Amino acid sequence: MRPHRVFLTILALLVTASVGLAAGRDALSHSWTDAAQEGQVVLVTGSTSGLGREVALRMAARGAHVLVHGRNVERGAEVVSEIEAAGTGSAKFYRADFASFDQVRALALQILEEYDRLDVLVNNAGFGSAPDERLLSEDGHEFRFQVNYLAPFLLTNMLMPLLEQSTPSRIVNVSSLAQAPIDWDDVMIEQNFSGRRAYAQSKLAQVMHTFDLHEDLMGTGIMVNSLHPATYMPTGMVQRLGVEPRATIAEGADAVMQLIVSDEIEGGQFFNQMNPARANDQAYDLEARARLRKLSQDLTGSGRANSRGGP
Ligand SMILES: NC(=O)c1ccc[n+]([C@@H]2O[C@H](COP(=O)([O-])OP(=O)(O)OC[C@H]3O[C@@H](n4cnc5c(N)ncnc54)[C@H](OP(=O)(O)O)[C@@H]3O)[C@@H](O)[C@H]2O)c1
């Protein structure tokens, strides 16, 4: 190639790249319906840091009003300020510790009182494998099982009337490829405990709930999906684990965004990043799912009979 051709080719590539960057932080926004989030109300749990924070910023950039949630008031205020400074969308911070069912209930009641719509619920808040220590929630349950699974189960059930009156609406459950089957004789992992097992059990429970809920919600206009966002993003929980990050937060956020805004996907699935994937076998065991549903209803005092008429 002649020198001036090389120059023109490089120039064209640079122009293409800069147009792409100018399109905003959401690199995938052009493949899906744009600006559909204008005026939508979106709750992203655990959006004071890491993946949830990035998803909150992206949804606000698309015009949504974002309910930023977490425990850390300062970091919550920072995310709200960042959204307000960007000048698109809006945000409000809500504090609730998921290790307390009372705080989850108070959060849900406040949202039900303050809003007459909820278009998207992203159940993202989570506590990782580290420390490798058996902890208990305020309600006396194994900590990861409550924070990562039972609390969002309760929150989702309580917010369902709002999601129902905002259809088409979506629920995205941020799970993981780390999945361990529930031992029904020892759900709270009193024997052979490890932080990794507790985390992985809670993450599979989220997927089981997703599949179960999907059957219930068919025909309602509420789509529910779950996903593994990316492997070892540089977030708080990965830093606490002390492993070398392997993916970027942007990659994980792309995967969550697809489940929020894409018109090309169907509900009731588990995605490994951008693609449908198979979860742990227990997620396809109807008896196990019914058992988990009953247990979760009993422990949280919430939920309704499923479409199959069972508990
Ligand atoms: N990082 C990864 O590579 C990876 C891989 C697969 C799946 N995931 C999933 O991605 C999701 C987001 O995690 P992350 O990686 O972004 O981690 P992170 O930076 O540690 O963020 C966790 C978020 O959850 C909130 N949270 C933690 N404990 C809570 C509690 N007891 N009550 C209420 N909120 C609580 C935190 O809020 P405060 O700090 O304000 O309490 C924070 O906003 C999690 O569900 C995780 O399982 C992450």
Image: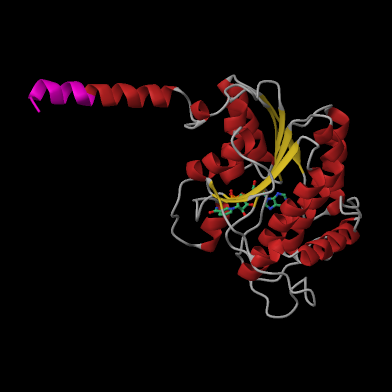
Residue 103 on the magenta segment: no
Quadrant of residue 290 within the rendered picture: bottom right
Q: Mainly helix, strand or loop, the magenta region?
A: helix
The reply to whether residue 28 is in sight is: yes
The structure residue drawn at horizontal position 74% and vertical position 74%, both measured from the top left corner, is 183
Left or right? Give the position of 24 relative to 98.
Answer: left
The outermost residue toward the bottom is 191
Can you give x and y, in whole percent of width and height, for residue 15 in the image? 31, 21
Considering the image in quadrants, where does the C terminus appear?
A: bottom right
Considering the image in quadrants, where does the N terminus appear?
A: top left
Quadrant of residue 168 within the rendered picture: top right
The structure residue drawn at horizontal position 64% and vertical position 42%, both measured from the top left corner, is 48
The reply to whether residue 45 is in sight is: no
The outermost residue toward the left is 2
- In the rendered view, would you say 92 is above or below 8? below
- In the rendered view, would you say 77 is above or below 20? below
Left or right? Give the position of 229 relative to 170.
Answer: left
The structure residue drawn at horizontal position 52% and vertical position 56%, both measured from the top left corner, is 239
Residue 3 on the magenta segment: yes
Query: How many numbered marks have been drawn onto this rendered protein structure?
Result: 0
The range drawn in magenta is 1-10
Between 154 and 207, the one lying in front of the other is 207
Between 246 and 87, the one lying in front of the other is 246
Can you give x and y, in whole percent of width and height, for residue 26 in the image? 51, 31
- In the rendered view, would you say 214 is above or below 44? below
Left or right? Give the position of 73 relative to 217.
Answer: left
Can you give x and y, in whole percent of width and height, for residue 278 in the image? 59, 58
The structure residue drawn at horizontal position 50% and vertical position 55%, both measured from the top left corner, is 231
Between 38 and 136, the one lying in front of the other is 38
